[in-house]
Amino acid sequence: MPPEKRLLPRTRATRRNVLAATVLGAMTPVGVGIGLAVRSNGEGGEAPAVPHQAPDLSKAAPTGTWAASGPQPQTTEAVVQIVAHPDDDLFFINPEVGQSLRSGRPLTTIYLTSGESNGVNGPRAGARTGTGAASGSGRGVGMGASQTRRPTRDKHKYAKARQNGIRAAYAEMVTGRPGHPWRRTVIATAGGGQAELDTLQGYPHIQLVWTLLHEAGSITGDRPHSLHGLWEGRIGALGSQLAYGGPVTRDFSYTKEQLIQTLTGYLKRFRPTQVRMQNPTPGRLDRNLRCSDHQDHRFGARFVQQALARYAASGSRPHFTVQTYMGYFNGGLPQALDPASGASKARTLATYSWSDDATRDSCEDPAGCGDLKVAASPKPRWSHSIHHAGDTGADWLLAGKDDSLWAFAVLDGRIAYWHRPGGETGKGSDGGNSGKWNASRWKGPVFQPETGVDTGVRPTALPDGRIAVFGTRTLFGDGSAAGYGKEVGYVIQSAPGEPFGPWQSLGTPELSDEIGTNDISSPAVVVDRDGAMSVFLRDSTHQLTTRAQQPDGTWTPWRALGGKAVHSDPVAATDRAGRAYVLAATPHTVLAWIQDEPGAEVRGPLATGLPATTLPLTVRRDDDGVRVFYRAPNSGNVCSARLHADALTAASSSSSGPGRVRRSSTAHTSTSVTDLGGAGGYGPVSATSGDRGDVLLAARTATGDVATAWGTSGRARTRPQWNHTGVLLAGAPSSAALSSGGVVLTMLGLDSRLYWTHATRGGGRLAPWQPVGSPTEGRSRA
């Protein structure tokens, strides 16, 4: 059964009660029985005398340490995470939460709702629990001495218990002691209400903000008094849900405008350089067409989008990137984390969920010290995975024939680019002949005027030397729910090296937001020899669709290309003959669409015989074929395989019907896969061939930084040696080969600055990394 068909939300179940239903396969208790420290009530007091060991998270490297020689650039990021419920950050954003906590840089997590659910801090009736999950007496949580007694309903106390669990989890990730005290205060919000602000004592840069709104209490059920109802105008205001014994003591409510004001005020207060949020367009399940994620996740994220748009239009502030994260559907995809990172994430969830019987009676808070609903139903498919709902990809750096460089990103919701002219410019700042590699020659970022651009733009070079940049935009229309939408489009240079023109919309293959939630991927682009462009997209039906440019410059209508259960962004490349290959991943394999000759329409899907991946793909020309790079599930190792059009056609000729492929990962073809090792991690892999046939590989590691290695055309008999950089990055790295020889590698830091390095020849040592611009750039009015 396909994983999306196993995601079966219950019609009347609450959020906590349906977690198990969204997980693929049988679940084994994870992290149950791990000892927790005796906790204070969060109001202060002494930490435990014997500290507990913090989750390792594979020894996350601190920001600012570099593997290369030379000066060590220091990043200045500030990360803000905005999620709907307490624990969404631990399930869907961690291990990136822990990596940022250990970086020594500011991290603020904002919770929109109190997550009060049905008010019962315990497993649902009849639930099978893990060891100790529901059997402790749980003083003050209403569980009593009997294991069969139903816990009492108290939404104020359950909200407080979840707060206590979050505070313990964060404290343990930072200090190793879940009982480390917090300072709890009240702040006035820009929307006229109040919020609780918690600051970890001794770590003033680590803060939690509790917005204290009422949650929906159902994944997909009709709950007008919710973020969903507020977004659609079904209610005039959404009320608060205060936590037991908290510093906020008076109820309040927010209109739609007041909530946007509140979130915008948070952004102005904490001044992020990266914002992490949930997926506003999660899509629907193929089996029953229900939304694949919680309604609070989806509509909370849309409020965040509107606040970000308003914040981006405000005055002096840092530039910022945005990263979105997949929610419940993580359970239907291959696990992206290596075992050590998954175990560390599970340990943090065990702390949050108060999963140890031995310490249950030692809790000093009458509300309880964690979320026993999670303790009752641990989620290994979530705790051992993470997926970015939108990513930068690994193809955002382009090199011209004159060695000029163009790097593209989305900052402040706008397309931004950095440009470095080609050719030598004389001596560098060190007096030597290093002017070619002087960072001061970079100019930017330069911004396009269009707003609402989503993370993940795709630049492509045209035969005449111009560049076109494709992406998607979120549209808010008049600000009403009906005005919300998404479109594909592009900007293009009027001449090589010249500025980019205005955004040109290609519309969308989607019928409506209600039907598909605007769940479309970032586009892949193929350019024919005559310069005609074709764009490929994964739509909300999880198949591929395309539009092609005509000789007169107009575009054909959207045309479906088939495929089933496609969940990755498509990627594209051409072989030596100019034939295009378009690849996309399902939870089980990779599908291909190919041209029989340059300029022809693509056909497919064709079976590749590749095994399951963690979804993100990178594809490069490899002589008369292409080579695909991806991550192996459960390890994060970088793998590669060569694909050839003739072999794909022959392998798929025995399919049972047109456009059909078998589910088996080894069907029809003996595609050989090379495991290139790595340092764990997830996300797209950057791969560029040098002048000696060596391939520079770069990828995010298990510790959140970039690691690099030189392979031999991606076909090394032995695994290459991977070297860490030590700096946390946004998205994925990108590289490009120079016509004069050598390779340039770039990445975007969490501080929204561009960093770059180079090797003067293939297989050579990378130079020290250099930041582009000064640390103060990007803090002026946009």
Image (cartoon, helix red, strand yellow):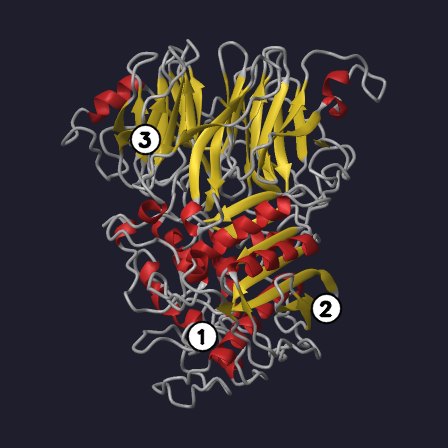
Q: Residues within 10 Å of mark 1 (few under 14, many from 20)?
A: many
Q: Where's residue 97, x and y in %?
A: 58, 55
Mark 3 to mark 1 CA distance (whole Å): 44 Å
Q: Is residue 737 left or right of residue 505?
A: right
Q: Where's residue 528, x and y in %?
A: 40, 13
Q: Amino acid at mark 3?
A: Thr
Q: Which residue is mark 3?
A: 545
Q: Is residue 502 left or right of residue 77?
A: left
Q: Where's residue 334, x and y in %?
A: 37, 47
Q: Which residue is mark 1?
A: 372
Q: Amino acid at mark 2?
A: Gln
**What is the quadrant of residue 650 in the picture?**
top left
What label sits on residue 181 in the rendered view? none
* Residue 332 visible: yes
- Quadrant assignment for the C terminus: top right
Element marked by disc 2: loop
2 or 1: tag closer to the N-terminus: 2
* Residue 634 visible: no
Q: Residues within 10 Å of mark 3 (few under 14, many from 20)?
A: some
Q: Residue at x 43, y 59 (%)?
A: 233
